[in-house]
Image (cartoon, grey):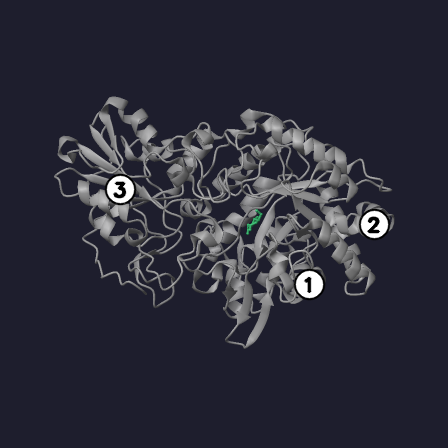
Amino acid sequence: MKALRSGLWLILPLLAGCAGTAPGGDLLWHGQDWPALRSPTAPDAAMEARIADIVRGMTLEQKIGQMTQADIRSITPDEVRRHYIGSVLNGGGAWPGMRKDAAVTDWTALSDAYYRASMATDMAVRVPVIWGTDAVHGHGNVAGATLFPHNIGLGAAHDPALVERIGRATARQVRATGISWVFAPTLAVGKNRRWGRTYESYSSDPAIVASYSRAMVHGLQGGLTGDGDVIATAKHFLGDGGTFDGIDQGENRTARTHMIQVHGAGYYPALDAGVQTVMVSYSSWNDTAAGKDYGKMHGSRELLTDVLKARLGFDGLIVSDWNGIQQVPGCTKDHCPQAVNAGIDMIMVPDDWKAFIANTAADVREGRIAMARIDDAVTRILRVKLRAGLFDRNPNAGAFAGKADALAARELGREAVRKSVVLLKNQGALPLAAGKRVLVVGASADSLSNQTGGWSLTWQGTENRNADFKGGTTLLAALRNALGAANVTFSEDARDVDPGKFDAVVAVIGETPYAEYNGDVRAPKPAAHSALHPADLTVLQRVSGKGVPVVSVLYSGRPAYANDLINLSDAFVAAFLPGTEGEGLADLLVGGRHDFAGRLSFAWPGSACSTGEDAASIVQFARGYGLSYAKPGRTGPLPEPAVPTAC
Ligand code: GLC
């Protein structure tokens, strides 16, 4: 069933005179209040009647089981059957049999076991379980899958069509493993580079986020029922990117109009594109200017029911984040009537799902949750499953299920890398001429972990070896392929090597992987790359000023303060987190066969303590900046204000 483009929301803003257009053609909402939208999917009377009939025949335990999402590490297929579980997920770092190198057929075997268990219950009408996963830059959990640049890099590509193609490829990768639901796209509008999830945001510009939102939803969902389609998730609703001081799961303190126009910008196109699920943000909203504290999103009926479901017309399902309900005052991870009453339909309770079911059944029996709310939640879950065709077939019966070759999208990944990196400086050092003798240095040169970042095989992207990625190419390997192995010498720390004996040096430096709050750079710590990763400064000091041009490539999940490193370099490339296809970088660095096209989607800071983009921020390179061979530019010595011990 193709989500019908109502187009209604495209008209309302024009009529209300409250709209502007994003680069991808999506109207931006400038209204003072939430736009009045409605679902792009026309009501299907027969489907709704079928749903009502199923719900009528369900017991309370069956209904609450349907609202429960458990992690595969804590539930067996037979428990899915006995407890009528509606969904399972594999959190980052969970694989079939807990084997990181599990083959696609191991994934489909487990998926098939869960599916068959859900279809063997004693329910009057059996409801298939749905499996969700975080495929946020390709199917990150699966060895051998092409991993694309993280969103911060895709934002620099300014290419919604590319993002839609990546969504299509990702959906195929996920369906190859028998999974039908992806917790993506993240629609955060990142506003403070201290935030550990900055790299999951496409941009600090709501227009870019809005232009990518529809593209990724269409890419992932396609027509919803095809063998290469998955259900998408708009996340995290709402305002995660504006968390104060970049403190993950913290407090968004912006004014209502800002929340509506900036942090909501990605959701309106996603809803109009027919996204079927929305994941709630851990963050809270406290409109300090208005003196109104909306509290934690997981407990906010005003935002989840009155705004998202009623005003914005969302008729899919709302899912909580991982144990997110425990952050609601008075709640625990296995008991939160406030969250269910706020409008959450499916509870991600990875481990304590048995207690959750028992506690929530008691809430209903003792009047803390109305049966009507439970029925509404189950109705929405069934609606999404029916729209996605889950009742019609085993998710492992599709054309891509069990097919390892569906994991590969190497040329698309390589193209995405070429388009997503940004040339910040080039004083004639690039392109490297073929046949030149090059010294490669830096701890990131031969590290697929640093190249791919978080959400890669494991949750944090750590504890991985290059071989675990099966088929990924580091930049070192790509340079050897492009220049000839005999012309490339590698010295990770640049000790005991004389740069003067080479024609050029390529220094590959970067952050080590992280995810979520582990990536926060908490104030008052200076957010300066050299302070956080001193070995990178040391290696550059060893090779710079030796009469040989130095090309620096930086892997980072955020705009980094790096004026000292840029001054030590003759060329400097902001590569963000490019993923497994290092060849895309060599395509740009060697021979000039491809030109740089990336332009910053976040402002690049000019001071260690400048972490935002407001008028008070010190910006070195503005959002939209990017050099190329066709459009070179001079980057003079940059100021290097003293980096304080505390901001
Ligand atoms: C995490 C993240 C969310 C992810 C979920 C499942 O805590 O906040 O983005 O989808 O858990 O892994």
Residue appearing at x 44%, y 44% in the figure: 154
Residue appearing at x 70%, y 31% in the figure: 112
**What amino acid is at disc 1?**
Ala
Identify the image quadrant of residue 617: bottom left
> Which structural element holds mark 3?
strand
Eyeballing the image, is 24 above or below 20?
above
Q: Position of residue 131 (x, y in %)?
A: 66, 40
Q: Position of residue 546 (x, y in %)?
A: 13, 40
Q: Earlier in the sequence, mark 1 or mark 3?
A: 1
Residue, disc 3: 552
Mark 2 CB within 8 Å of ligand 1: no
Identify the image quadrant of residue 294: bottom right
Mark number for residue 134? none
Image quadrant where one finds the N terminus: top right
Instruction: Compute the Cα span from label 2 to label 3.
Output: 60 Å
- The residue lying toward the viewer, choosing from 467 and 382, is 467
Image quadrant where one finds the C terminus: bottom left
**What amino acid is at disc 2?**
Val
Residue, disc 1: 342
Mark 1 CB within 8 Å of ligand 1: no
Residue, disc 2: 55
Residue 127 shown left or right of residue 584 in the figure: right
**What amino acid is at disc 3?**
Ser
> Which structural element holds mark 1?
helix
